[in-house]
Image (cartoon, rainbow, N blue to C red):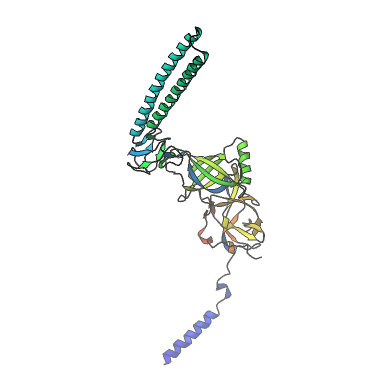
Amino acid sequence: MRSLRILAVAALITGGLHGCAPRSEAQAPAGPPPVTVATPLQQEVVEWDEFTGRFEAVEAVEVRARVGGYVQAVHFRDGQMVRRGQLLFTLDPRPAQAALAAAEAQLAQAEAQLELARARFARSEGLLASQAVSQAEADADRAGLRTAEANLAAARSTVQARRLDLEFTRVTAPISGRVSDRRVDPGNLIGGGSSAGDILTTVVADGPLHFAFEGSEALLLKYQRQGANGRPTPVSIRLQDEPDYRWNGRLDFTDNALDGASGTIRLRAVVANPQGFLRPGMFGAARVAGSQAYDALLVPDSAIVTDQTRKVVLVVAADGTVTPRPVELGPISDGLRVIRSGLSATDRVVIGGQQRAMPGQKVTPQAGRITPAPGRSEAPTVTVAPAATATPANALPSR
């Protein structure tokens, strides 16, 4: 019991001594809060107008037969590349051959009738000189000659038409390109010779494609002025599964009138397709150059905060004081926001830890770096110091 009392008294004395420790040994108050700063990125920028459109074939043909008949054979594989004039379908030629033979027989008959009419007219002219026949008989023989000549011309035209019908039993590719699948099989009876005839297949031209989209009247005026200066308007396109704009073309056509209902006009670009990867009907997101290249200052969109109706960025002075700087914003380029005015290339902009940066107060700046994210308009790359990473503020801190 006596030893326990001694230990308790010792513990009380030790606690009292610690409670009497001088204030200088306590933790010192924290300094200015750390934030990450970086100078604006200086980069050459082209402003882009964005659109959504669809690829179209430069040439597309619905293959129809020029005559009707039974399909005898198909001479291509579905989806293969074909050349202009290549045989695609064969129709049964026998009805056309019989019609041609009949037309040739009529031609021979017309030639014989013409020879007879010429002989009669020559005889009538000789007898008329000796007044052995009347003038009326000579005139009738002259008319008979002209009729025979006309019948011969008609028979020759009929033969030519029947020969074309026989030729049209061979359905060939009207253009070079990629053929679709066959719509009819051998043995089917098809109609032909008009736009209402059966579609046998389709062919779309290989090579460059058109990219069609619609733009406003204001954009039309801008592109026309750019074109008037002799500068072609470039177009960049990305497909729905691509992160960047890898397909390049140029604006080559605008429609001749605006749509009165929507106030838009149809525009078209021609896009190279050397490997045949692009197909008509594909959707794409297009960027059309809306300006010539110029030098600009860029910062992350997260570094911009709102002060009522103004857009500002927080700038750290040489002594560490935070100052809000009103800026005029431009478009997004490579994931970064273009600053049209309000900043200089040497300003240190707060890009991390904005919630700790109070205007008029001092902070501890830590160096960061701004890098672009090519091909992306929503995800800039910002390299910051580890100690300054923090969730960016959505509004300007209160004064």
Q: Is residue 55 left or right of residue 99?
A: right
Q: Which residue lies most toward the top here? A: 130
Quadrant of the drawing holding the N terminus: bottom left
Residue 52 or 109: which is nearer the viewer? 109
Q: Quadrant of residue 368?
A: bottom right
Residue 343 or 129: which is nearer the viewer? 129
Q: Position of residue 302 (x, y in %)?
A: 57, 58
Residue 227 or 100: which is nearer the viewer? 100
- Whether residue 106 is visible here, answered yes or no, is yes
> Which residue sits at x=44%, y=26%?
157
- How many marks overall? 0
> Which residue sits at x=42%, y=25%?
155
> Which residue sits at x=52%, y=61%?
387
Q: Position of residue 60 (x, y in %)?
A: 46, 40
Quadrant of the drawing holding the C terminus: bottom right
Determine whether 321 is above or below 242 in the image: below
Residue 310 or 177: which is nearer the viewer? 177
Q: Position of residue 226 (x, y in %)?
A: 61, 39
Determine whether 152 is above or below 80 in the image: above
Determine whether 399 is above or below 120 in the image: below
- Whether residue 93 is visible here, answered yes or no, is no
Q: Quadrant of residue 220?
A: top right
Q: Which residue lies most toward the bottom here? A: 1
Determine whether 327 is above or below 184 in the image: below
Q: Position of residue 246 (x, y in %)?
A: 48, 44
> Which residue sits at x=51%, y=43%?
211
Q: Quadrant of residue 306?
A: bottom right
